[in-house]
Amino acid sequence: MRELLDDIDRWRADGKRVAVARVVDILGSGPREPGAAMAVNEAGEVAGSVSGGCVEGAVVSEALGLLHGERGPGIVTFGYSDDEAFAVGLTCGGTIRLFIEALDW
Amino acid sequence: MSGVTGVTGSSGVFEVLRDRLRAQQPTALATVIDGPDPGRKLLVTPAEVLGTLGHAELDRIVARDALAELEAGRSGIRHYGPEGQTTPEDLVDAPTLAVFVESWSPPPQMWIFGAVDFTAALSRVAKVLGYRVIVCDAREIFATRRRFPAADEVVVSWPGGLFERRGDQLGQRDAVAILTHDPKFDVPAVQGALATRVGYIGVMGSRTTHAKRVERLRDVGVTDEELARLMSPIGLDLGARTPEETAISICAEIIARRTGRAAPSLRDADGPIHS
């Protein structure tokens, strides 16, 4: 989160709405620890990362969906081991759970 | 609730979090990630609690747990009943909340004794790993900021003085590397480090140097149990030659000691890479 602060400040100063996705859980092998975070603003600009580049594209889609009111805050799962998981996975075979929310708090 | 406001509807929790993270102050943030109202926040610091997860008793229990996570430098998910219930019996009939507790502890410290080339390299590698680096040497002409630009602090002092003033700051996550090679410095540095709770003490020198140093340390009353805490000669057996390679071997040893691994190559082992 700390490494996102400068971008978040700049975006919010420009009046842009921001969504934040944080890794809350890793099952099996995963490149980042819980707490790894990325931020996406309503213009689609991105800061930070939550994996080794495997799921970031899908996180941006979810974040924009959230900022456009198409979904609420909640958990998003990426990986192959879960039926409800997104088609995108981690190349290392693990499952990653993110909590995604608008930065309105 | 803080009086700070940000973009529309802001509770001010983010602003407090942001300012504390920038100041590297210990902070935990609890977020309901699964439950009736996902996104609710409780910010917990050793001094205050800000925000709410929706119930006073839940806030109290989560704040207690978040402080423990903060002390251990851990982040993870915990489950509670809507009123803070934590025992399995309590949770049988109550719908549970999943709360992600993220904690930010101040960076670990590495104290490096001896203003030598190995110290310059080690301070650079330690910075990459996120340490707050303090270089200490009693010789004013060597212990300069110009020679150690990567260090957060360069302290001109005898080792004993630094340990007396600040040794109580050191804990399990911190490291002391003694690279002086000179018994005048390294004996008091080892004694100072042994008097703290620091998690790693590495001392540079050949096996011959180490054997002589052990004699001197015994002479000043250091016990076998204390000697067993010392990693000396310092570093993993990588065949490191240059100061930079040696710095990698020292940092790799610190990681391996923390994780309890024997540090062979991953290719030559079985089992999960992370655990």
Image (cartoon, rainbow, N blue to C red):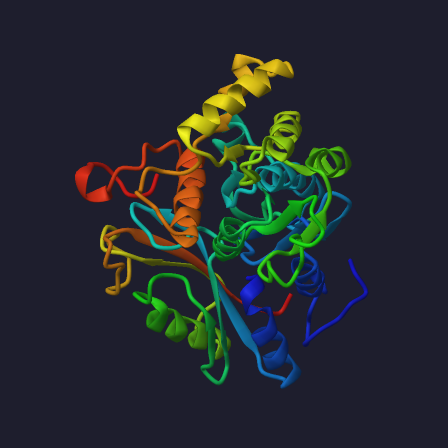
Nearer to me, B133 or A4: B133
Residue beneath the point at 50% across and 34% down:
B202
Where is B32 relative to B170, above or below? below
Residue beneath the point at 63% across and 14% down:
B221
Residue A33: x and y in percent read: 43, 51
Answer with the quarter of the image where residue B251 lies: top left
Answer with the quarter of the image where residue A61 lies: bottom left
Q: Is residue B37 left or right of residue B43?
A: left
Nearer to me, B255 or A22: B255
Nearer to me, B247 or B243: B243
Q: Residue B34: tell me if it is visible.
A: no
Where is B125 relative to B96, above or below? below
Query: What is the number of callouts on the image?
Result: 0
Residue A68: x and y in percent read: 48, 79
Q: Is residue A66 left or right of residue B52?
A: left
Residue beneath the point at 72% across and 33% down:
B160
Residue A23: x and y in percent read: 44, 56
Q: Give the quarter of the figure containing the C terminus of chain B.
A: top left
Q: Give the quarter of the figure containing the N terminus of chain B.
A: bottom right
Residue B260: x and y in percent read: 39, 31
Residue beneath the point at 44% across and 77% down:
A64
Answer with the quarter of the image where residue B249 lies: top left
Q: Is residue B54 left or right of residue B214?
A: right
Nearer to me, B54 or B106: B106
Q: Residue B144: tell me if it is visible.
A: yes
